[in-house]
């Protein structure tokens, strides 16, 4: 008599490429549909910056920009095939990934509050450096925030963190040290990217330092908990602080 198949452990199952692909798919569909349905004349006005950069790279390579979502899904699918993992999807794992994403997003929001308090205390002044665009309609902002969760994580974590890790391994750094240096270096690039380009935010130490800390947070989640939860955490955090906890425009502190 054959023994029943052992159920996969949630903590390891949530890190698999297949689980990440299935968890990413709803976020990706919401964003791509939202860009079209936002009702603006130019969809590029709604697209997240990382999405725009990745599409520009595809265009310069002679590929169609519309292939970007399929390319992202293809990377995860190829990763799963090369890993020789079983084709098994647990709905309980997907539910757990959502809960874990929300918990991590709330933790990052709390970290942001501590960062804000520490900065105000050390500077001895009131600083207002919003990390989100409060001038656009909430629906447009929500779509852009979901896009940030998807494509910023594709660019800075799914692509750059492994590339940086391999780069540091070329210089024979131990694996743990190479992973730490990859997380730190890509977090710096993540923060810097928000201050580069014609529509970039003005540089301010407050926003730059928090984005660097947030980048390190996301890189740590990516290395420890996988790509899918990182996307969910990033998107949920942006929606939390940019929509649910957004300061009204007539607030004295805004």
Image: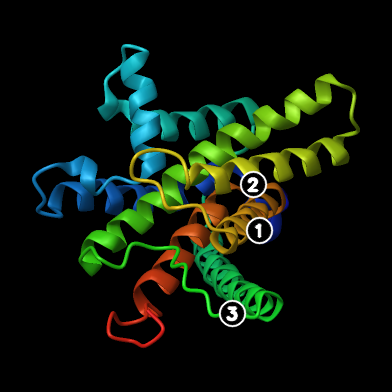
| Residue 136 in which image quadrant | bottom left
Q: Residues within 10 Å of mark 2 (few under 14, many from 20)?
A: many
**Residue bearing mark 2:** 187
Q: Secondary structure at mark 3?
A: loop
Depth check: 7 or 194 in front? 194
Q: Residue at x 73, y 38 (%)?
A: 182
Q: Residue furthest bottom?
A: 252
User: Taking 150 as reference, is 244 above or below it?
Assistant: below
**Which one is closest to the eye, mark 3 or mark 1?**
3
User: Taking 87 as reference, is 34 above or below it?
Assistant: below
Q: Residues within 10 Å of mark 3 (few under 14, many from 20)?
A: few
**Residue bearing mark 3:** 125
Question: Where's the C terminus, which quadrant?
Answer: bottom left
Relative to 11, 67 lies left or right:
left
Q: Which mark is residue 213?
A: 1
Q: Are marks 1 and 2 in contact (CB under 8 Å)?
A: yes
Q: Secondary structure at mark 2?
A: helix
Question: From mark 1 to mark 2, how far is it between C-alphas?
Answer: 7 Å
Q: Are marks 2 and 3 in contact (CB under 8 Å)?
A: no
Q: Secondary structure at mark 1?
A: helix
Q: Earlier in the sequence, mark 2 or mark 3?
A: 3
Question: From mark 2 to mark 3, how far is it between C-alphas?
Answer: 27 Å
Question: From mark 3 to mark 1, how far is it between C-alphas?
Answer: 21 Å
Q: Earlier in the sequence, mark 3 or mark 1?
A: 3
Depth check: 252 or 177 in front? 252
Depth check: 88 or 49 in front? 49
Total tally of numbered discs in the picture: 3
Q: Residues within 10 Å of mark 1 (few under 14, many from 20)?
A: many
């Amino acid at each position: 008599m054959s023994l029943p198949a052992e159920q996969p452990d949630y903590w390891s199952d949530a890190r698999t490429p297949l689980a990440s692909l299935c968890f990413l798919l709803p976020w990706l569909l919401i964003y791509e549909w939202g860009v079209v349905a936002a009702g603006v004349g130019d969809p590029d006005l709604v697209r997240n910056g990382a999405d725009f950069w990745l599409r520009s790279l595809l265009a310069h390579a002679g590929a169609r920009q519309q292939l970007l979502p399929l390319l992202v899904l293809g990377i995860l699918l190829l990763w799963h095939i090369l890993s020789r993992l079983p084709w098994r999807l647990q709905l309980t794992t997907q539910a757990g990934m959502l809960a874990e994403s929300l918990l991590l997003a709330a933790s990052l929001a709390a970290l942001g509050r501590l960062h804000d308090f520490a900065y105000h205390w050390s500077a001895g002044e009131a600083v207002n450096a919003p990390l989100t665009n409060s001038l656009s309609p909430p629906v447009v902002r929500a779509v852009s925030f979901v896009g940030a969760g998807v494509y910023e994580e594709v660019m800075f974590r799914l692509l750059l963190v492994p590339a940086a890790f391999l780069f540091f391994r070329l210089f024979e750094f131990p694996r743990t040290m190479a992973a730490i240096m990859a997380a730190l270096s890509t977090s710096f690039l993540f923060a810097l990217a928000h201050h580069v380009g014609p529509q970039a935010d003005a540089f301010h130490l407050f926003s730059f330092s928090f984005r660097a800390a947030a980048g390190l947070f996301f890189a740590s989640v990516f290395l420890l908990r996988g790509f899918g939860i990182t996307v969910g955490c990033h998107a949920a955090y942006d929606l939390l602080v940019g929509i649910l906890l957004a300061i009204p425009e007539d607030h004295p502190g805004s």
